Image (cartoon, helix red, strand yellow):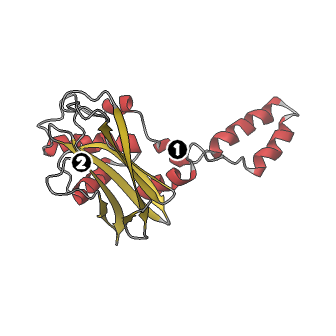
Amino acid sequence: MLQRHFECYRDFTPFSPIHIPATLEVGRIVARTNMKTLTIVALSLVVAVPTCLAEAAKSHEECMKMVPGDWGANFGTEWHKNEAIYWGCRLGVTSQTVASWQKASEKMGMAQDISLAKIQGHELVVIEEVGGDSHCFDVKVLAKVKEEWEVVWRLPIARNSMDYCTGACPAVKAKIADKVLTIESPQSSDPKEDTTFTCKHVTWRKQKFRWTGTTFALQQS
């Protein structure tokens, strides 16, 4: 199922054109003759839509209906089970697949975001994790290695560093495009502002990491 999802993700992005089969073009000409043929052409159009779209990702509101209001003790077994159901719904994959990502990444906190990418045939999963009162972020990239999910990259964070703790500022962003992983972390441009409580003057620091074939390496500007 995951393979089908990645194929759909690759081929049917919002910017990808959907090509109409040549047989449908011929059908349009015939359709001018009578209404019965036009009905057949309309049905052909429905059949032409790939079945993988039936497993499309759902909205936050739709997926929240799939889980109980109380997920259980914070970050406990039941909590992570419900989190897997939610993100499986959001991404159009099974909760078991998300659970395998949780296990491989040794995730302890909350998934702020999970996104999928494909580079040179490599299926990648980007997990943005947040935890603690200071909203400290970690980002991990998983890849399939010998049929098992493994962490192939992790955000380089110095020991006891608060560089990626956002407080009241927006969340850290992670995105893969054109073989480059971009990390955007918010900061307050006001040195006197205590971001524990407010973050009114936000600036963004960008870091870029390029895919090497097996992991991501810092891209020098």
Closest to the observer: 220 or 55?
A: 220
Label 2 Cα crowd, 10 Å radius (few <14 / some 14-19 / many 20+): few
The relative height of residue 178 versus residue 121 in the rendered view (above or below) is above
To which quarter of the image does residue 158 belong?
A: bottom left
Q: Is residue 96 visible?
A: yes
N-terminal label among 2 and 1:
1
Q: Which residue is outermost to the right?
A: 33
Element type at marker 2? loop
Label 1 Cα crowd, 10 Å radius (few <14 / some 14-19 / many 20+): some
Left or right of 32 on screen, residue 208: left
Closest to the observer: 166 or 49?
A: 166
Kindly identify the amino acid type of the residue bearing the numbered disc 2: Asp
Q: Which residue is outermost to the bottom?
A: 146
Marks 2 and 1: CB-CB under 8 Å? no
Q: Measuring 44% from the left and 55% from the top, which residue is drawn there?
A: 117
Q: Measuring 22% from the left and 28% from the top, which residue is drawn there?
A: 69
Closest to the observer: 23 or 39?
A: 23
Q: Position of residue 220 (x, y in %)?
A: 42, 62
Q: Measuring 79% from the left and 32% from the top, which residue is drawn there?
A: 36
Q: Position of residue 15 (x, y in %)?
A: 60, 45
> Where, quadrant-wise, is the C terminus in this rendering?
bottom left
Element type at marker 1? helix
To which quarter of the image does residue 218 belong?
A: bottom left
Left or right of 190 on screen, residue 27: right
Q: Which mark is residue 163?
A: 2
Kindly identify the amino acid type of the residue bearing the numbered disc 1: Leu
> Where, quadrant-wise, is the N terminus in this rendering?
bottom left
Closer mark to the observer between disc 2 and disc 1: 2
Q: Position of residue 141 (x, y in %)?
A: 33, 58
Q: Which mark is residue 53?
A: 1
Left or right of 15 on screen, residue 136: left
Q: CA distance from mark 2 to mark 1?
A: 40 Å
